[in-house]
Structures are given as structure tokens and as C-alpha cells.
Image: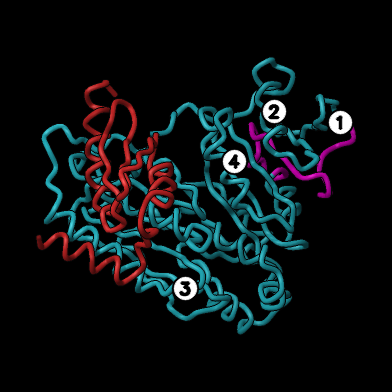
Chain colours: A red, B cyan
Amino acid sequence: MTASRQGAVRIRIANTAGELAAPSGVRLTAWRDRFQLTGPTGKRELATDLAGIWRAVDRLGRTMPDPLDEAFLECLRRRADE
Amino acid sequence: MTNPSSIIVDVLTGFLGAGKTSLVRRLAEAGALSGVAVLVNEYADIPVDQNLMGLSGLKAGTFADGCLCCATDGDLRASLLQLLENRASGKVPHFTRILIETSGIADPASLLATLVTDPMLRPRLRLGRVVTLVDLCHAPATLAEQPEAVAQIVAADVVLFTKSDMVDESAIEVARAMMCTINPIAILRECDPHSGLDPFDRHALETNEARSPIAPPAHAHRHGIAATVLRWPASVDWAVFASWLSLLLHRHGPNILRMKGTMTIAGEEQNGPVIIQSVRHIVHMPEHMAQSVANAGTEIVVIAREIDPALIRRSFETFLAQAERKIRPTENDLPQNHAAIA
């Protein structure tokens, strides 16, 4: 995969995983060859892959996102309606 | 995607006394293991001649038909690396496939995780088929008392019933019902020693991966295990699926016992569906199906423990639906980053 294509994939992952991290108050962006996570207090961490993203979200976020939690799913639905 | 020149590793498992070594012996006698290196645990009754070769920590012998048989002391990673090194240096006969016979009390998930994730093994080996033997005489008691036996069935692509000549038809039906509950993905067969069936022969015994649609699993709970089918009618954005799956496995990995199915990836429709599978939290590299199927959507069976399967289905559908509305793919967003889940 070319560097530009890898970059595009990273942006795409940042967007989609960012939707799941948003209910925890964590913002996710692609940064160079990594992902940058910014918590609700402004604290930042870097991650290299999706597993690292979720570990960082658990540390930075207000809540630990659970895709099987109804309240979490409802939050996703509300965000999609915005 | 996987390297097509890598060596296929098949796994034979089953609880103590299920008949693993007997099956290996029968396959060897039938010539089905020619060019195959068989790696067995040290407790097995190794069906080789007495002319064992010392191989730096491995004991090995050859069958008359050219099958190489090795014994390991339990460190399968080290044994596999040694075997590959010996193959490369010509210390052992050339082989094109490896068959691992696990210990009867092994949970194969850790072995499969090693094969899929180890940086030294992953580029050289490719996971083939997991065959689990189930002793019909003892199946209900073993499954009730031994969690490893349940784990062996969960990991199976093929379940072979042994000792069917020692039980009546009702016991076979009970065992079939139990297997369908624990692992609706697996193909079920009786292991008749006179039939010549080779459960590792992909042409003789096709697994469910070539079927479409996937048969709906039984929903009755046993051992806290239940299954569901995730369905999506259209192609799926890989980044969306990878994000959702990685979070699901991060939060619930130990209880997501198995996933297997097919998915058409958005932007890759012309290549046909890919096979998606995981054992516990380890996701295998997706592979395009050898045979294309008409269904262009997604069907993935999920086997979970102590989780309401309806919750998994609802989560999957909710996220894909909201992603379709909220997240618009851009021109360069191509779904090639299959390893991103790991």
C-alpha cells in the first residue's frame, strides 16, 4: 500500500472509530502514521492501531465505551440524527 | 491477505481418548499424510517406527509413505520454528503441510492465536482446518465437566463423532443437538474407521464457508453459550466494521468465542466476499473465498458466552446503519487495511 493510501485509510479509521469514541468525550484524529486521541480534559495520547485506540479511550474518556450497552447505542443514534 | 505459498497448518483436537492418534494412524496408513509433517504432543502414543531422529529438541520419525512425525514437549511455537528451520536446511524430508495433534486437555484457542499473531510464524504458516473429535460414549459428561472440551468444539471447523458403533442412534442425535448449540458453524460427521474419510481433505469435506446462506444456528443455551447471525444486505465499509469489531473484542473478547462468515467489502465487490473469522479476540486475516457465492451481503455467525446474542446483532446493525447516515466515505478511503483490527 502506498503512503498516501495508508494515510487515507488512517483517516477513515479515525473517522469511524471516532464515532464510537465520541460518547466518551474522546476526539480522534489521524496524525502522521498514528492516531491522536484527545480526552475531555485536553489530555492527549497516541495510538498505532485500533486495539491501542480503545485502550487509550478507556484511560482518557469519561466512560469506557461498550458497544453492547443500550445507552451507548442510543447515543450513537442521536449523533447520527444531528 | 495471506501468502499463498505459506505452509497450511491443520489442527486435530479432541478430548482425552477421543481417538486422535487412531485417526492419524489411519490417515497415515491410507497414504493421506504423504508430504505432511505431523506434530504431536509428547503424551500421545506416536505412531511411528522406532528409528527416531534427534532434532534439537524434537523427536521425529517417518512413516513409510513419507509423512514426517514429530513429538513436542508442549512448546508448539518453538517446535514449529524448529521444524521450519529443519525443513529449510534439509534436515527433514520436504513437507507441504503441517498437522498438529493437540493434547487432549488443550484449549486450541491459544495455539490458533500463536499461529495467527506470532511475527515469526505468521508469514510462513497459514491456518487450515480445525478438526475436533468427539467421543460419543462420553460426550455429555465430558462437555458438562470439562471446559477444554467445549473450547475444542467452539474452535472446530469440522466435528467428527467417534465410537458411533458403541452407542445407539439417540445418543448420536443428542450429540448432534449439543454440537449445533455450541458451534453451529461446524460441519458434523461420523468418523467411520472403514470409510476412508479424510477430514482435512478440502475437496472431500467442504466446510460451511462455501455455503450461502449460512444455516441459522440453534438458539438454545447450553454452558452459557449462544449464537446469532449478523446479516447486512449490502457491502460493508471495512473501516466501519473493523472499528465496531475491535471495540466489541476489546470490551467482550473473552466471551466472543468465535465468529465466522462472509462479507462483501465496499469497493471490492468485484473480488467477491471475504471470509471473516475469529477465535476469541484473535481475528484471522480475511481471505477471499475460493468459490464465489450469489449473496453479496454479509452473514457472520457469532458464538458468544454469557451474552445475549440479540444485543450483538442490535449493536452491529445500529452502528452500520448510523455509519451509513453519518460517515460518508471519501474518494481515497479504500478498504485495504485488513490488519487494522489486530
Residue positioned most to the bottom: B170
Residue labelled with disc 2 = B83
Q: Is residue B197 above or below residue B306?
A: above
Q: Position of residue B325 (x, y in %)?
A: 11, 56
Residue labelled with disc 4 = B114
The residue located at (55%, 57%) in the rendering is B155
Label 2: how many Cα within 10 Å (few below 14, some 14–19, many 20+): many
Label 2 or label 1, whichever lies nearer to me, is 2
The region drawn magenta spans B28-50
Judge left or right: residue B70 versus residue A73.
right
Q: Is residue B308 above or below residue B73?
A: below
Helix, strand or loop at mark 2: helix
The residue located at (61%, 84%) in the rendering is B170
Judge left or right: residue A13 versus residue B180.
left
**Of the residues shown, which amino acid type is indicated by label 4?**
Thr
Helix, strand or loop at mark 3: strand
Label 4 or label 1, whichever lies nearer to me, is 4
Label 1 or label 3, whichever lies nearer to me, is 3
Q: Position of residue B64 (x, y in %)?
A: 76, 33
Among numbered discs 2 and 4, the one appearing first in the sequence:
2
**Of the residues shown, which amino acid type is indicated by label 2?**
Leu
In depth, the one of B192 and B324 nearer the eye is B324
Among numbered discs 1 and 3, the one appearing first in the sequence:
1
In depth, the one of B255 and B8 nearer the eye is B255
Among numbered discs 2 and 3, the one appearing first in the sequence:
2
Write down the chain letter for disc 4: B
**Residue B226, label in figure:** 3
For the residues marked 2 and 4, what is the alpha-carbon distance in whole angstroms? 15 Å
Write down the chain letter for disc 1: B
Q: Main secondary structure of the magenta part?
A: loop
